[in-house]
Image (cartoon, grey):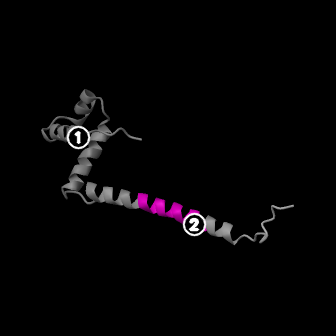
Amino acid sequence: MPKRYPEEFRRKVLDLVAAGRPIAQIAADLNISDQTIYGWRKQELIDTGQLPGLNRAELAQLSAANKRIRELETEVAILKRARELLREPHDPKGGTRP
């Protein structure tokens, strides 16, 4: 899983990029991947409407919806298994007494 950086840190890095500093130099100075910075820059362009794509709010909403879908799918699987167990024939007398 990629390392998470605080929003304030990302903002400062993007300010350095906007000021004209080379991304490779910023990445080396801060010991982070240049691809990370390129990704942040691209997401900022999406968030400001300069590039098409899902902004951060939409990405968060999509992530939450996908998590809920996984939870519901798990719940459905559990209920299906419970239904199968309840449908299995059983001995009405219990079958435990000799």
Q: Residue at x 52, y 63 (%)?
A: 75
Is 14 rendered above or below residue 68? above
Q: Residue furthest left?
A: 19
- Name the main secondary structure of what is drawn in magenta: helix
**Disc 2 marks which amino acid?**
Leu
Count residues near mark 1 (Cα–Cα under 10 Å), then give few for <14, some for 14-19, many for 20+.
some
Q: Quadrant of residue 29?
A: top left
| Side of 1 where 39 appears, left or right | left
Instruction: Return the residue at label 2.
Output: 79
Count residues near mark 2 (Cα–Cα under 10 Å), then give few for <14, some for 14-19, many for 20+.
few
Q: Residue at x 26, y 60 (%)?
A: 52
Where does the N terminus fall, quadrant-wise?
A: top left
Q: CA distance from mark 2 to mark 1?
A: 44 Å
- The answer to which of 40 and 64 lies nearer the viewer is 64
Q: Select label 2 or label 1 by which is in front.
A: 2
User: Which region of the structure is painted magenta?
Assistant: 67-80
Q: Earlier along the polypeptide chain: callout 2 or callout 1? A: 1
Residue 43's label in the rendered image is: none
* Location of residue 68 in the rendering, given as x and y in whole percent from the top left corner: 42, 61
Where does the C terminus fall, quadrant-wise?
A: bottom right
**Disc 1 marks which amino acid?**
Arg
Is 31 rendered above or below residue 69? above
Instruction: Return the residue at label 1.
Output: 10
* Secondary structure type for disc 2: helix
Residue 55 seen in the figure = no
Residue 31 seen in the figure = yes
* Secondary structure type for disc 1: helix
Q: Residue furthest right?
A: 98
Is 82 rendered above or below residue 35? below
* Location of residue 13 in the rendering, given as x and y in whole percent from the top left corner: 20, 37
